[in-house]
Image (tube, grey):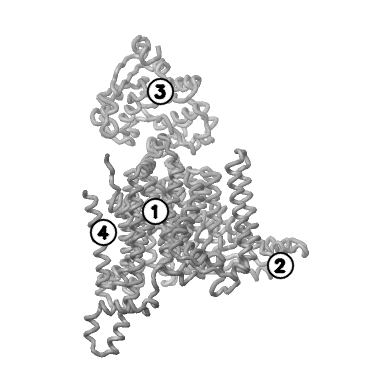
Amino acid sequence: MFFSANRLTGGYGGVNIIEDCSFNVDRGEIVSILGPNGAGKSTAMKAMLGILNLKNGDVNLDGKDITNFTTQDRIKQGISFVPQTKNIFTELTVEENLEMGAFINEENISSKIEEMYDLFPIIKEKKDQQAGELSGGQRQQVAISRALMTNPTVLMLDEPTAGVSPIIMDEIFQHVLNIKKQNIAILMVEQNARQALEISDRGYILVTGKNAYEGKGEYLLNDKEIRKAFLGG
Amino acid sequence: MTKNFDVKISFTIMAVLIALVGIFQSWGVALSILNLCLISAVMSMGVNIQWGFAGLINFGVMGFLAIGGLATVLVSVPPVYEAWAAGGGGILISGLFLLLVIVTIYLINSKIPKFKYKNHIIFLIIIVSIPLLKFISGPAIGRIESINAATSGFLGGANLPIILSWFVGGILSALVAFIIGKICLGLRSDYLAISTLLISGIVITIVKHEEWLSRGVKNVIGLKRPAPYETNLQKTDWFINAIEFFNTSKLSNIIDLEARASLLNQLVITSSGIFVKLCFSIIFLIVVLTLLYLSEKALNSPWGRMMRAIRDNEDAAKAMGKNVVKQHLFIFMLGSAIIGFAGAMLVTYDGLFTPSSYQPLRYTFLIWVMVLLGGTGNNYGAILGGFAVWFIWIQSAPFALFIINLLTNHLDETSYLKEHLRDSVPYFRYLMMGLGLLLVMRYRPMGLLPEKVIKN
Amino acid sequence: MDFLNAIILISNFIIVPAITYGSQLALGAIGVTLIYGVLRFANFAYGDLMAFATMIVILTTWYLQSIGISLGFLPTALLALPIGILITIGISLFFDKTVFEYYRNKKANSVTFIVVSLGLMFVLNAIVRIIIGPGDINFMDGHKFIMKAREFKNLTGLNEGLAIKSTQVITLITTVITCSLLFYFLNKTKTGKSMRAYSDNEDLALLSGIDPKKIILITWVIVSILATVGGTLYGLDKSFKPFTYFNNLLPIFAATIVGGIGNPLGAFYGGFLVAFSEITLTYAYKKFFKYLLPENLEPNTLIQFISTDYKFAISFAILVIVLIFRPNGIFKGKVI
């Protein structure tokens, strides 16, 4: 596997929020992390990013152990992250947001920006507008394209569809599918489990900080027990 | 019980230090330091109530101290009847006008339902009423200030005992705090800090420039005292007899009668100064102990626990149905009242009111150093801070001089560096305060006597 | 003719002084706002940092004068500016390293930072007074006036004179240059944009690979430049006195908040707004109306909104009004 996190255990102040969790994702694959509220989904993602101190477990990227890397170093290694909230620079223009995303790669910023505009045509129209003035869906697109500016090999999305309308949700998922074509490994935490699984290759279901189920997207979608417990029937 | 231990040790050290000053410098100096330490303790207790109990940053200490100072003038100075005759009516009418404006604004703000231009109307009223107020009061102020400009030129006060002014100072401060609190208390903590600092600047400007009220930069001197005057004491029989009695052995050694009388005279003069200061010390000590008793009681009451709960987690307290805004306003007024009380005490002790002497460094930030150094949220800490910081503030000049002399010992007496350093001795106290504050914040962030954690 | 006289009167007593004072406040306010935006605290030591910077410039000026170097008709202090800037950068970085960094790493709250900056304020205050004393120092040399009132009167034949001090022109030109460079840096360069990004959203800036250490370093460098330039210009125009510099912190804070704390462009406008309000509201317009109105309507009072004693109070009053009606400032705050 291109990116793998094994047996992660950690939390805040002595209390373990995730215990013995493992995830992995390959390039060109979409993997969702699902589960009820408070299951530790976002915490698991923070652990993989190095924002949370681990008590146990390791994180590997392309065969390299990056467990002890700082967040900043992981980003330089090719991991990119879109937080759930506050994921754009509201006071900067859309184009400046993209430039900031590319802060660590020196060359070809303008061609990379053009690439983003091709991928997300709507934000090209708004490129000189302050990002904070955009609508929720547009902001989400700016946020994702900012994260893609670092030329990542692994893209992590924390609830990319939180708080947007169903139409916009479909649109965002469509964009995620397009990103997958660029041979990027995509790992996302989602509340909208059913829709997320529909576009995912595989999924993990977390319950109280532990891996409860994992498997192919269709398998999880079709399993009666899982449907009843997590997908609302 | 380690806490009591700390308290005892630190206050013993303070007492020894002041006693050392008495032995090596003079008892008069020691008592002066003690008195100002006691006043400082009241000030820092006031700030501690706001900051330590409720987490409110009040950088307007200077303004409340000045209001307290103004109260001594308004309460204790005899009224100037000619000035009242000349312009009293005009001032009263202006006062009524001001009251009318305030009531109107209040009514518009609270009684009229929200509409778009409400704020604009209030703004317009303020803008129009300032020149109007000037127009109404101008002639009266001119007449008042022209009456015996050199010695009076103001309305004077109510000719009441000066101790009363301490309470009046407290009440006035609380009223001003009410207005400031209404405007600023909803703001973020750093905005609150800046705006209280700025508003205290306005207060000082008013006290400094409204001469009909406070004589402004011309100062009010010769204020009343709650203690006897030295010159009167020196003529009082029981005092002379007492001094003679205490110094019998010293006096009886002298055979020459004239020399004996002159020594006695000398002793009476020095002792009278000390006696007066001692009287002040006793009054101030009573104030400090009463305040300490009351605020310890308050701190450990259900109300005190609620205040700390609000300070530590405002949202949770709100969720539990506590009216945070109201409590904050109340505690802001309470703390400010104590600061105003202390301001009146200070002016009473000095015997004069000098509006131009109020500067933020000495009258706001130094008090803050006292609270932070002593221990936030702990009354004993606030008192200790008041004592320790005032002691260092006063004694750092001689201390700095001693160090400078030691370091520049090898230099020639006329050396420029030596002379320059000696000239700048007074400023080393700022350095000591700054370094002290930085070190305490770094290594003992809760102060010398931290807040005790009450476990149940 | 009377109309022209009235215009000249207003220019001489309101517009020229207000532009000068406004520039000085603007430079200070931008410094405070940058610290707030990037380091996230209100720096109460800023006035004394300006005093320290100006002191270094004065000492360097004295040294230059003693070895016979001067700038001819310009003040020698301009030549001393670079030294002042360098040493101020040094002391800012020293204090950041020894004082602020610890609290930043601990993620201390803004109140702690304010208290710590108070400590620093005392220290800087002491250093300045110990080295150069508390007195008034005039270090302006070179030509005093570009245009004297009498020369203007002779030139134009008007009753009213327009005096322009060279320090006023120097202040304006220097401010325009400094602010243009600063805004170019913030809006057009990658580093400047990353500074704005960091100020806007610290966590996302870290996720984008922006190095906070570098941002903080650059901020202190810019702030030191602004403090030195602003302090020196003020000292040249009026005079240098440590206490005045501390006091100037108050209108500077007012300008910062009025402009929206954290917003440099807002701080720039805020400085001018405060300066113009202070001067227009305390000016006595009697003479002005004498020129404009027919004789029988001439005013017999001063026509002054509020006495000059309350000059400082005006900036506080503006601040209070802004805080009540628009707590985020006239221009939206928290941007850089």
Per the image, the residue denoted by label 3 is A182
Name the residue nearer the viewer: A115 or A51: A51
C308 relative position to B288: left or right: right
C-alpha span from label 1 to label 3: 62 Å
Per the image, the residue denoted by label 1 is B47
Judge depth for marks 1 and 2 and give the one in front. Answer: 1
C-alpha span from label 3 to label 4: 73 Å
At horizontal 40% and vertical 74% (from top left) the residue drawn is: B229
C-alpha span from label 2 to label 4: 74 Å
Tags 2 and 4 both on a single chain: no
A22 relative position to B40: left or right: left
Toward which corner of the image does residue B30 lie, by quadrant? bottom left
Judge depth for marks 2 and 4 and give the one in front. Answer: 4
Mark 2: which amino acid?
Leu
C-alpha span from label 2 to label 3: 77 Å
Per the image, the residue denoted by label 4 is B11
Q: Secondary structure at mark 1?
A: helix
Residue C245 visible here: no
Tags 1 and 3 both on a single chain: no
